[in-house]
Image (cartoon, rainbow, N blue to C red):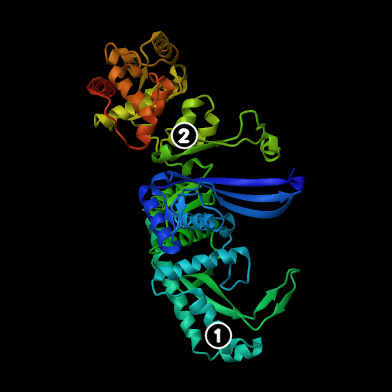
């Protein structure tokens, strides 16, 4: 239990080092510390460990260690040796300096503060936005800093006086308009970048809207360990963000939750990425855009590649299928708990004990291959790939197929043969056409129902004709369209199946579910893989026959 836990909690990170990385580390170690690094024995993977030590639930000490120790030697040493003592710390800090900065977007920033203290005063959210504000100043490119051009002016030596005396001096001080000039430049930068991106992503005209940043000074104070506040003669300054729309002004926090999230997100990401000379960044987001509606979520992920450009990287977790981009499935991971953990309800999941926790992270492809029956874990991804027509025109002539596998294969074939004008709709099996057959008969719709050419397909065809009064020319089996082909999968010859096997990295010929997944992923990523002339010829003939029957 946490109240009596005694021991260490550790997090280990494994970093990959390129040949150029090793050479740069060796050069800096030699130039700054007169130490030689044995580059030839430098491993490609470097391990760091951060530990926190607890005693009966109380935090005691933190450790940060380099677990991979390359050989070094000093200027007067002839033999290579492991670093020790001060040399180990030097090597740890030097190598860590080459790692990307981690930029974590915490959930508390959704509540955009009405004021942001630019001094050490204030809450955690103030300190977060103080760093963001400095990013804005860096982006402006004028060399302004919060300390030098804002706080330093307010706390200049002649102004370190009691509050009443400060006020009388500050009201006529020449630095007041200089600070506002810095604020105005920051406001112009935010307006251009944030509203520009808003217009690009959501297609809304933002002309006439701008971000106004003002500042105020307040009496300085300090807080002791017991929380007692006492006035000081070094006074504080805060910034205030507002949105001006024509003659009206609004605090950012008065806008919708979705806008506040987007505003904070743009401030956090766009200015950090735009800074020149910035180290590579790893952006971490937990459930991003959860406060935006579905369409906005789908549009927002379109801006992620702009954040993760160059050497920058972006990683995020989500439960929303709108935030899953099918083109990124190869970079997607499934996070699961151990199979026997109780998950019968939300309350059970909240109250899991430590013994029930065994979190696993598996790549999407590996998980699907290893656990084909546990679809609940990757259902958000499957949802994103399912067929959800945005418009269903009941009067349009359509081809109704037995299921999703038939749909995915024929959609792919239509793309590969450039016959994309064929309207295809998936059902849920040969025996599930009843409702659609009734609609077809009752509303005189123009559907063509396609069933497998096996025994079940032919039996169901006769049933729909006799029970629902379906015209015989509206019910067709696959073997009637292409001789020798009973099921859609029969369009795939040996060469095509070998291609799918290689693409999915399988050890054996793909089964029906794996074939379906192959076509799902290729459609989602808009990728056409050459499956050979045999597949193309059969598929083209099948689609032509469908068009003729539909007409």
SS label for mark 2:
helix
For residue 443, say whether it is visible. no
What mark, if any, has residue 364 been given in the picture? 2
Point 58% across, 91% down: residue: 169
Crowdedness of circle 1 by 10 Å Cα count: few (<14), some, many (20+)?
few
Compute the Cα span from label 1 to label 2: 57 Å
Left or right: 11, with 455 as reference point: right
Q: Between residues 499 and 311, which one lies in front from this camera angle?
A: 311
Residue 79 position within the rendered picture, expressed as x and y whole percent measured from the top left: 45, 50
For the point 61% across and 81% down, the residue is 235
Find numbered disc 1 in the image and state the secondary structure of the residue it sits on.
Answer: loop
User: Residue at 59% across / 80% down in the picture?
Assistant: 217
User: Does 344 sit above or below residue 92?
Assistant: above
- Please report whichever mark, 1 or 2, sits nearer to the chain's N-terminal start: 1
Q: Quadrant of residue 159 in the image?
A: bottom right
Q: Position of residue 282 (x, y in %)?
A: 46, 52
The N terminus lies in which quarter of the figure?
top right
- Residue 146 image offset from top left, x and y in percent: 50, 74
Crowding at label 2, few (<14), some or many (≥20) Cα neighbours within 10 Å?
A: some
Q: Nearer the viewer, mark 1 or mark 2?
A: 1
Q: Which mark is residue 156?
A: 1
Q: Is residue 466 visible to us here?
A: yes
Asked if residue 114 lies left or right of residue 282, the reply is right
């Amino acid at each position: 239990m946490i109240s009596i836990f005694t021991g260490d909690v550790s997090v280990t990170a494994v970093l990959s080092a390129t040949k150029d990385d090793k050479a740069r580390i060796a050069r800096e170690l030699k130039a700054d510390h007169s130490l030689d690094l044995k580059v030839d024995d430098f491993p490609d993977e470097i391990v760091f460990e951060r530990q926190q030590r607890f005693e009966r639930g109380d935090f005691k000490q933190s450790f940060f260690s380099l677990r991979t120790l390359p050989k070094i030697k000093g200027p007067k040493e002839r033999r290579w040796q492991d670093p020790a003592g001060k040399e180990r710390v030097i090597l740890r800090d030097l190598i860590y300096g080459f790692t990307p900065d981690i930029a974590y977007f915490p959930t508390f920033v959704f509540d955009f503060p009405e004021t942001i203290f630019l001094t050490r005063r204030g809450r955690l959210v103030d300190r977060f936005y103080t760093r963001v504000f400095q990013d804005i100043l860096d982006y402006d490119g004028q060399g302004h800093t919060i300390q030098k051009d804002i706080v330093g002016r307010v706390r200049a030596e002649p102004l370190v006086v009691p509050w009443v005396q400060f006020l009388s001096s500050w009201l006529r001080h020449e630095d007041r308009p200089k600070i506002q000039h810095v604020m105005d430049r920051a406001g112009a930068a935010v307006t251009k970048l944030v509203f520009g991106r808003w217009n690009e992503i959501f297609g809304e005209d933002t002309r006439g809207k701008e971000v106004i940043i003002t500042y105020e000074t307040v009496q300085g104070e300090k807080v002791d360990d017991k929380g007692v506040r006492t006035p000081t003669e070094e006074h504080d300054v805060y910034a205030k963000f507002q949105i001006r729309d024509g003659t009206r002004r609004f605090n950012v926090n008065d806008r919708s939750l979705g806008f506040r999230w987007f505003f904070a997100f743009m401030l956090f990401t766009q200015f950090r990425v735009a800074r020149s000379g910035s180290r590579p960044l790893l952006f971490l987001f937990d459930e991003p855009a959860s406060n935006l509606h579905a369409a906005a979520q789908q549009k927002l992920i379109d801006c992620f590649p702009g954040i993760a450009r160059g050497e920058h990287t972006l990683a995020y977790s989500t439960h929303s299928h709108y935030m899953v981009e099918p083109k990124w499935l190869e970079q997607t991971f499934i996070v699961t708990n151990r199979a026997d953990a109780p998950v019968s309800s939300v309350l059970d999941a909240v109250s899991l004990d430590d013994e029930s926790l065994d979190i696993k992270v598996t790549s999407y492809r590996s998980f699907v291959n290893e656990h084909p029956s546990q679809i609940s874990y990757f259902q958000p991804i499957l949802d994103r790939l399912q067929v959800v027509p945005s418009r269903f025109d009941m009067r349009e002539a359509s081809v109704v197929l037995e299921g999703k596998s038939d749909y995915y294969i024929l959609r792919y074939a239509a793309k590969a043969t450039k016959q994309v004008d064929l309207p295809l709709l998936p059902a849920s099996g040969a025996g599930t056409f009843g409702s659609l057959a009734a609609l077809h008969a009752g509303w005189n719709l123009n559907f063509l129902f396609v069933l497998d050419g096996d025994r079940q397909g032919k039996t169901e065809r006769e049933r729909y004709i006799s029970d629902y009064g379906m015209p015989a020319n509206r019910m067709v089996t696959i073997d009637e369209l292409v001789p020798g082909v009973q099921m859609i999968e029969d369009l795939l010859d040996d060469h095509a199946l070998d291609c799918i096997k290689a693409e999915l990295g399988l050890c054996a010929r793909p089964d029906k579910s794996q074939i379906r997944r192959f076509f799902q992923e290729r459609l989602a990523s808009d990728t056409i893989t050459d499956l050979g002339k045999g597949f193309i010829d059969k598929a083209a003939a099948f689609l032509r026959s469908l068009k003729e029957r539909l007409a």
